[in-house]
Image (spheres, rainbow, N blue to C red):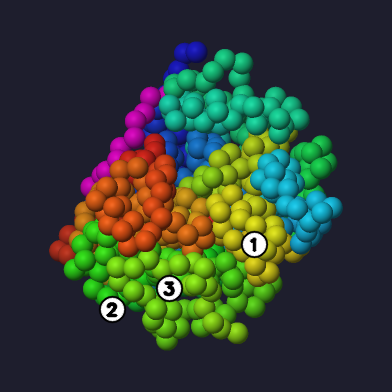
Amino acid sequence: MKHSKILFSVLCNCCFIVQCTAQINAYQYHSQKKVSASKGAVVSAHPLASKVGIEILKSGGNAIDAAIATQLALAVVYPGAGNIGGGGFMVAHLKNGKNITIDYREMAPAKASRDMYLDANGNPQMNLSQDGHLASGVPGTIAGLFASLKYAKLPFKRLIQPAIDLAEKGFAISEAQAADLNELKKEFLQLNTYPVVFVKELLWKKGDTLIQKDLANTLKRVRDLGAKGFYEGQTAALIVSEMIKGNGIINLQDLKNYKSKERTAVEFDYKNYHIVTMPLPSSGGIILQQVLKMIEKRNIGSMKFQTAASVQLMVETERRAFADRAQFLGDADFVKVPVKTLMSDKYITQRMADFKPGKAGSSQVIKAGNIKESEETTHLSIIDKEGNAVSVTTTLNGSYGSRTVVSGAGFLLNNEMDDFSVKPGVPNMYGALGAEANAIAPGKRMLSSMTPTIVLKNKQPFMVVGTPGGTTIPTSLYQSIVNIIDFGMTAEDAVNKPKFHHQWLPDEILVEDDFDAATITALQAMGYNVNKRGQIGRTELILITTGKTKSIIAVGDKRGDDDAQGY
Ligand code: GLY
């Protein structure tokens, strides 16, 4: 196929004319891992999406405009996690000093029920909560994008056009994407009722063009009709007819009823910094506050990066925070969550009272405090020249979600229902446990770990950061923040150095393959069970220093196709 450059009409003020547009070559591109900039920056999981975002900034859009356009582009060029059939969270610090969060997490359909994934003997059928039609919650992404539009400057039509072009004209897939699509071929064939664009007869290879005409048409309906172009009319009818084909339960009323919600951010001080992050239904903000507050007075900086002492301290804070997550956390619109207590200094201090340096704790002994979620999510971080900062994490849950594509509408549905606690004590795909607080109920939102975060210094954005990774999200964030603030690392090192994770149960420390061998040996000598695993997260970090001149360093994680753009 002869490739030509896609000329994104989005950047034209007047109309969709080629002459006044920036050129993004969708067939030849590479990942830029780090950029220094003075005005604005965009970091995301895919070079084409980052380029779309930066062009929006350059053409007068603000960080919220860029976040909307980047998310829509990711839904096309990064279909494993970028989405319109899933959900997400946005945390933003606006130039007027206001902090906002938008929750567009998926919601359980009206026909969902507590035991819907249990068989007649009460045994969980995890394939149903993870694969195919019944695994999907009502998608929230399009509602979330329209909710954020009130903070944007440019018309929605301009923000969505690059995604439409990329879907209609196609783009060259990366090596990693080719490998993913080849690996999932069997599932795509099993879980779909008609041929999907992600399957072809021969193996996919790097540079092959992926064209998504049905998706382009869905995006055009959203462009022309707004959120109704997704939640009502033809797209809604296609979703419901897909549900009927595969025994799914999302109906027209569920779609019409879906609402995103602005929520009060989790905000707290850590040393001389102010952290702004996501509240429930994400567990991430609460976990991040708990773990950072548990180490705040313990001078972790003097213990140095990834020594046995510093890793042990952080692991023990993670153990305690995740025990609380399993017991207490769920959608606070549905269940009573003791948020104030969980985040109080007194409670947090008391949680570490039994910490013993040099000796492994035990999850049999350390349970939740005594008071009456594959990892294919994706993150983008953006800063603009006006001082608006946006941190968005969005997800289909597993890689390519439920692997079910809505026939005729061309987008993948999420498998987010698995983030509920299908049965108390039964781990989900991330090994996370849950209790009654995260049980399934109609209209309820499943507990998440997504932790889009902004760190302020002197009331100005200092870090814009986030990552995919299921339950490893808050612990990766924790490490990125401590790496910068306490270990004085560069942005690149803070993102790319090996990461570790502990989540109470299973009682083990997971470390990336390149984690320091001597530290592993020392942790084992303390009594820890340490296991290697593949990569943890894909962090997108922007670091802003303000002095006489503003300096921006944006870094995309080395672990994927992640890409940083700036100007
Ligand atoms: N589906 C991953 C999360 O929300 O944490």
Residue 410 lies in quadrant: top right
**Residue 139, how many percent across, how many down?**
66, 51
Marks 1 and 2, how far apart at CA? 34 Å
Q: Residue at x 64, y 62 (%)?
A: 425
Q: Amino acid at mark 1?
A: Gly
Q: Residues within 10 Å of mark 3 (few under 14, many from 20)?
A: many
Identify the residue under disc 1. Answer: 425
Q: Is residue 413 above or below residue 308?
A: above
Left or right placement of residue 300 versus residue 30 in this view: left
**Residue 454, how many percent across, how many down?**
38, 64
Marks 3 and 1, how far apart at CA? 23 Å
Identify the residue under disc 3. Answer: 290
Marks 2 and 3, how far apart at CA? 13 Å
**Residue 117, how many percent across, how many down?**
75, 52
Left or right placement of residue 93 versus residue 283 in this view: left
* Residue at disc 1, secondary structure: loop
Task: Give the number of the disc on residue 297.
Answer: 2
What span is in magenta? Answer: 26-36
Between 326 and 79, the one lying in front of the other is: 326
* Residue at disc 3, secondary structure: helix
Camera-near label (3 vs 1) is: 1
Q: Residue at x 65, y 52 (%)?
A: 418
Between 168 and 412, the one lying in front of the other is: 412
Residue 559 lies in quadrant: top left
Left or right placement of residue 6 versus residue 122 in this view: left
Q: Is residue 462 above or below residue 458?
A: above
Q: Amino acid at mark 2?
A: Lys
